[in-house]
Amino acid sequence: MAADYNGTDAFRGATFTSADLTGAKFRDCDLRQVRIDDSWLIDVRVSGEVENFVVNDVDVTAFVAAELDRRHPERVQVRAMRTVDDYRAMWDTLERLWSDTVARAERLPEPALHQRVGDEWSFVETLRHLVFATDAWAGSAILDDPLPYHRLGLPHGGYPPEDAAALGVDLAARPSLAEVMEVRAGRMALVRGILDGLTDAELDRMTSRLPTPHHPAEPRSVGRCLRVVMKEECEHRRYAVRDLAVLEAGDPEPS
């Protein structure tokens, strides 16, 4: 059985020479400044925060970003937000895109919506994570609610289970799509309500409560918090659409 290294720094600065890493998986890992030389990279998939990514002496960072922007122009729209009207228009776009995406997902059988593609979150888990993101960045940070977290929310994979439980989150829950969509609708309405009452002064207001106890204490404006919510919505919809295409093709693993 392959070894599983979780939460370790044993390989920091390590050198692998003539090592067989076929089928190895790296998830939620810090791979900054990793160098791979004279190696076989065939059928390799990489996803994450990509900067200064050089392949065979070519920095492909800008190409990857430009291609993602071409496929998902909402990424450009969220980066361009400056005014209150920009934020409202962005949320209009997200509501429309997600409405189309959910309608597409609902054409699949319920079990498929709980199926993970390439060990990524299922469609239902993705929606649960967006519930949690809204609770953290809108409910806690913007609205100053000390405990806004719904039990069906889902924090990122590295979030300590005992800390999730302290927030009232049930990591063991296995809700249906309908159950999650009911919670999700309330969270989207919450963001819409914030945006409807948004002013330039409110956009610049500094928040005092952390999104979660794990976030560092640093200045955050309402605008910055809303930007995080909308970036989460953009990127996780991108992942969801990618995986829906695989599920529609009847293939549990991406090609």
Image (cartoon, rainbow, N blue to C red):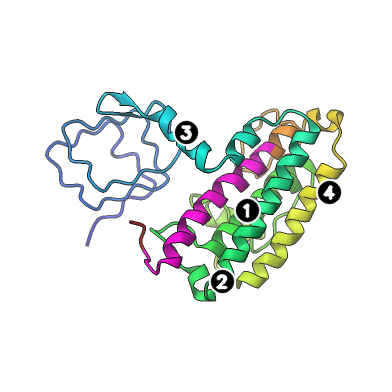
Residue 217 location (% of width, % of height): 66, 32
Image vertical order of residue 190 relative to residue 17, above or below: below
**Magenta stretch encompasses residue 18:** no
Q: Do the residues labelled 2 and 4 touch (CB within 8 Å)?
A: no
Q: Residue furthest left?
A: 18
Residues under labels 2 and 1: Cα distance?
Answer: 21 Å
Quadrant housing the N terminus: bottom left
First reached walking from the N terminus: tag 3 or tag 2: 3
Which residue is tagged 4? 193
Q: Which mark is residue 1?
A: none
Residues under labels 3 and 2: Cα distance?
Answer: 31 Å
Residue 157 location (% of width, % of height): 49, 52
Which residue is tagged 3? 65
Q: Residue at horizontal 40%, vertical 59%?
A: 119
Amino acid type assigned to the residue bearing label 2 in the image:
Arg
Question: Horizontal placement of 209 versus 238: left or right?
Answer: right
Question: Horizontal placement of 162 versus 28: left or right?
Answer: right
Q: Residue at horizontal 67%, vertical 60%?
A: 168
Which residue is tagged 1? 130
First reached walking from the N terminus: tag 1 or tag 3: 3
First reached walking from the N terminus: tag 3 or tag 4: 3
